[in-house]
Image (cartoon, rainbow, N blue to C red):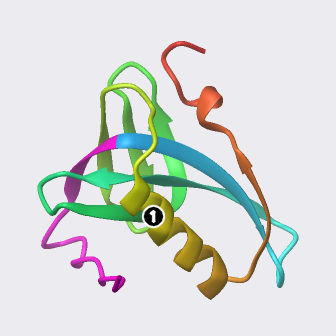
Amino acid sequence: MPIFAVAPVHEEPEETIMRWSIREVLFDAHNDKSHHLVGYISRQGKGRVTSAIQSFDRDTMRIKTRSGRVYQLDGPPGFDPDAEYVWAQWKALNHVREEADVTDHYSWLH
């Protein structure tokens, strides 16, 4: 299954993402940890892994990433096989050394 490039932020400044989760990663070359949104973009029918999360508004359930794109979280956290496939490829390409699921820190149930 191919991995597709994401459109530039100026073309798609906002997206709605469903069946989402948040992963914390530690890269081989860095000691810094970052959080990334993993989920399914139904408009495109594709899984997505975002750039690092910069801000989160729990009231509106919106996330802004380092790229400047804003994601509206649609529904509760969940699992999507396409998103997990993209996540596995993304981790390999970015030399992720460690990962943890930190979705609970972003859930309105927390």
Tell me the residue at 47%/68% (across/down).
85
User: Looking at the rendering, in which quadrant would you find the C terminus?
Assistant: top right
Residue 54 lies in the magenta-colored region = no
Identify the secondary structure beneath mark 1: strand
Residue furthest out toward the top: 109
Position of residue 87 measured from the top left corner of the image (x, y, whole percent): 53, 66
Q: Nearer the viewer, residue 101 or 15?
A: 101
Amino acid residing under circle 1: Val
Q: Nearer the viewer, residue 3 or 59?
A: 3
Position of residue 25 measured from the top left corner of the image (x, y, whole percent): 72, 61
Q: Say whether residue 49 is left or right of residue 31.
A: left
Q: Is residue 39 shown above or below 18?
A: below
What is the chief secondary structure element of the magenta stretch? loop
Tell me the residue at 21%/78% (across/down).
7
Which class describes the residues within 10 Å of circle 1: few (<14), some (14-19), or many (20+)? Answer: many
Mark 1 sits on what residue? Answer: 49
* Highlighted range, magenta: 1-18
Tell me the residue at 30%/84% (across/down).
5
Q: Nearer the viewer, residue 2 or 57?
A: 2
Tell me the residue at 42%/42% (across/down).
20
- Which quadrant holds residue 92? bottom right
